[in-house]
Structure formats: C-alpha cells, structure tokens
Amino acid sequence: MERKTKVIAEEGKQYLTITREFDLPVELLFKAYEDPEIVSQWMGTKVIKLENKQHGSWQFETSDAKGNVVFQAHGTIHEFIPGQKIIRTFEMLNAGFDVQLEFLEFEKLTEETSRLNIHTVYKTPALRDEMLKLPFAYGINMAHDRLQEVQAQFIR
C-alpha cells in the first residue's frame, strides 16, 4: 500500500498537524525515533546526541561532501514514553526560525501497521507559514519513505 505523509496547516493557526501511516509495527516505528543509528540512516544526518528521557537533549548535524556543516538542529526532550509518545523542542541553528514544540504520538493500528501523529507548534502563524515556504512537506514525506524502507528490513 502506498503511504504518504499528510501535512495539515489551517489558515491563521500557529501549528501543523502531520500524520503518516506505516507498514510497520508500532514498536519498529518508535525505534526509528529512539535508536541513534536508525535515526541517522533514515534522516541522512549525524546524530551527535540523543538522550531519550525526560529532560534529555538531542543534537543532529549534516555535512556536505567536503565536510562543511550545512545543517544543525538541537532540542530538549520534555517527555519520553517508550512506544507511545515523545514531546520535544526543535531548533535549527543559523536558520532564522524560532524554536518549535513537537508532540509525537505513535499509534498501533494493527499488528503490522502504525500511525505517527505529529503536532508542531510555532511561536506565531507567520513563523509557521515561513517554514511551509521551504520544501517542508516534500522533505518530511521523503524522510518518512526512507524510515519505512530502513525499518522494513526488520519485519519477519
């Protein structure tokens, strides 16, 4: 079944709702956000830090072929419930965007399928709209396609 990430941006609101169904058990979907090695594979970035606990922190960076850092992001994990939920902040360095708050919920649909629900809150509707001017929806869909591909190898 073809899966596609849906990004819903209501006019005048300062949040996004992102949903994606996966042909993965919820345990494998959650592990893709929990295990630094797997995160690195599907996101195509280096995981500098990933402390999966309340008040933990995370840091990612991506470099070009010459080793120049072209993307850096970090945040704090506010809540971490294995297999169910992650609440965290997300901040891109040197990008001109304020920090955002992300609520990730992992939902079991069947033994073999699951859904990821992300609610992302921005400081203002204008900042959310600026983020949407980037190829945001394309990029997250591509990343989720890669997540599905990476984790599908673990299905028996």
Image (cartoon, rainbow, N blue to C red):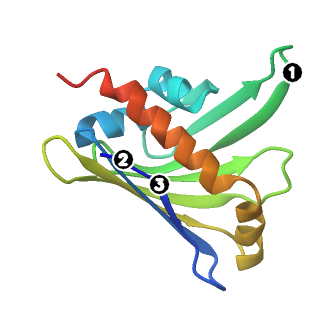
Residue 31: give x, y in percent of width and height. 35, 33
Q: Establish if 122 lies above or below 3.
A: below
> For mark 1, what is the residue?
68
Which secondary structure, mark 3?
loop
> For mark 3, what is the residue?
5
Residue 125: give x, y in percent of width and height. 71, 78
Q: Is residue 76 visible?
A: no
Label pair 3/2, CB-CB below 8 angstroms: no
Query: Which amino acid, mark 1?
Result: Asn
- At horizontal 63% and vertical 46% (from top left) the residue drawn is 139
Q: Establish if 41 lies above or below 103.
A: above
Work out whether residue 14 or residue 153 is closer to the camera in this orientation and state it: 153
Which secondary structure, mark 2?
loop
* Label 1, residues with CA under 10 Å away: few <14, some 14-19, many ≥20: few
Residue 24: give x, y in percent of width and height. 27, 38
> For mark 2, what is the residue?
2
Q: Which quarter of the figure has residue 30?
A: top left
